[in-house]
Image (cartoon, grey):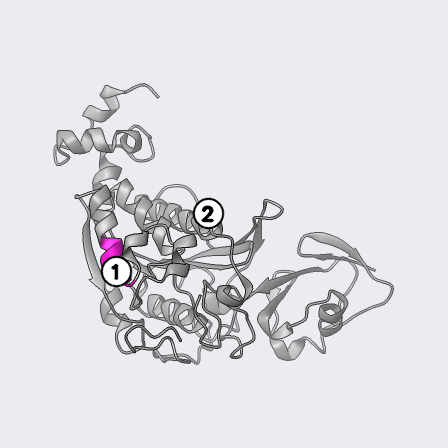
Amino acid sequence: MKLIVNGKEVSLDSKLTVSELLVNQHVKMPEMVSVELNGRILRRSEFGTTALGDGDAVEFLYFMGGGRGTDGTTN
Amino acid sequence: MPWNSSILWEADVALTEQQIERYSRNIILKQIGGTGQEKLLASKVLIVGAGGLGAPAALYLAAAGVGTIGLLDGDEVDLTNLQRQIIHHTKDVGRRKVISAEEKIKAINLDVKVRTYDVWARADNIREIVRGYDFVIDGVDNFFAKFLINDVCYFERIPFSHAGILQFEGQLLTVVPGQSACYRCLFRSPPPTGSVPSCGQAGVLGVLPGVIGSLQATEAIKYLLKTGELLTDSLLTYSALTMDFRKVRVGRNPDCPLCGPKATITTLVDEGQVSCNKKGCKC
């Protein structure tokens, strides 16, 4: 099965859910990622139940700040 | 580029001769002209965060002749800021950021009126501050303030430019509230505390906010002039390591808790500690 992940073709041996793709693509902190599937932003609760199909386009959109994290540290 | 006096003479009499000369490279552009330059001089842009992103945005908007620039930042200049926050100089370490930035803007262009807000953006002060501005630049360094800016601009219907940076990567999105995807359409709520590293923890290439903050200024100018195509409904991502610019289409999200049809956010709230108010505190 072939997907387009962040604009690049990715070949997979088996069908995956979005949650499994996050693991497969070594996204260590899924809580810092929004996932867009074929132009639609998924709810986090859909990650585990949404199965990906051949030709799907997936975008991982990352939280990016500007110096300060969420833990109160400064830049 | 040769001086094209015929175009310059079309400028409205409201521009002085010195202004026509100062802004000649703007005025010569058919998308700007004398009328566009007058529009810029009559425009008001608020820059929230006088740091890495706000620095180039403020300098370029001042040079372009944006008539009123608001600067909001409750911080003081730290030595570690100077690697990228180019509006602040070595002599400014320990000074209030808004004062330091105001000085540089005035040194570039006395046409610009500067309004300073030496405070942190909070739910109980931001609405009052943004009112009257034509465009807002999100140059803040924390997620709580980014969501606050998104929300207040939605409630006040003021377009803004969102940007984020980390290490070698940046992102950019222009939001025209009610018309294009907002920050919450992409990211519903702030990430869990501690989940996203800060630049202090992960580092940031100093020139990166220069690139991204300059793009924010570009979007502001385009919006003010009503020219070109805004970066709406698209998240621009940039990698300094690979020099890849990518535009990811992101339409309005029907599930958006702020601008969707079933919105649940109806008022401004502080979703976390934006910053510490203790003088000199670096928390």
- Image coordinates of residue B280 in percent, x first then y, are 31, 72
Magenta region includes residue A50: no
Q: Which mark is residue B98?
A: 1
- Report if residue B98 lies within the magenta region: yes
The residue range painted magenta reads B94-102
Most frequent secondary structure within the magenta stretch:
helix
Amino acid residing under circle 1: Val
The structure residue drawn at horizontal position 42% and vertical position 71%, both measured from the top left corner, is: B147
Answer with mark 1 or mark 2, whichever residue precedes in sequence: 1
In the image shown, does B41 or B168 lie closer to the viewer?
Answer: B168
Quadrant in the picture for residue A40? bottom right
Q: Is residue B11 visible?
A: no
Disc ID at residue B211: 2
Q: Dot 1 lies on which element?
A: helix
Confirm whether circles 1 and 2 share one chain: yes
Please give the label number shown on residue B275: none
Foreground residue among B25 and A3: B25
Q: Quadrant of the C terminus of chain B?
A: bottom left
Q: Residue at x 47, y 78 (%)?
A: B262
- Percent x, y for residue B97? 28, 61
For the N terminus of chain B, the quadrant is: top left
Q: Amino acid at mark 2?
A: Val
- Mark 2 neighbour class, 10 Å CA radius: few under 14, some 14 to 19, many 20 or more: some
Task: Residue B118: give x, y in percent of width and height.
Answer: 24, 67
Q: Chain of mark 2?
A: B
Residue B23 image offset from top left, x and y in percent: 25, 33
B12 to the left or right of B159:
left
Dividing the picture into quadrants, the one containing residue A5 is bottom right
**Above or below for B27 versus A7:** above
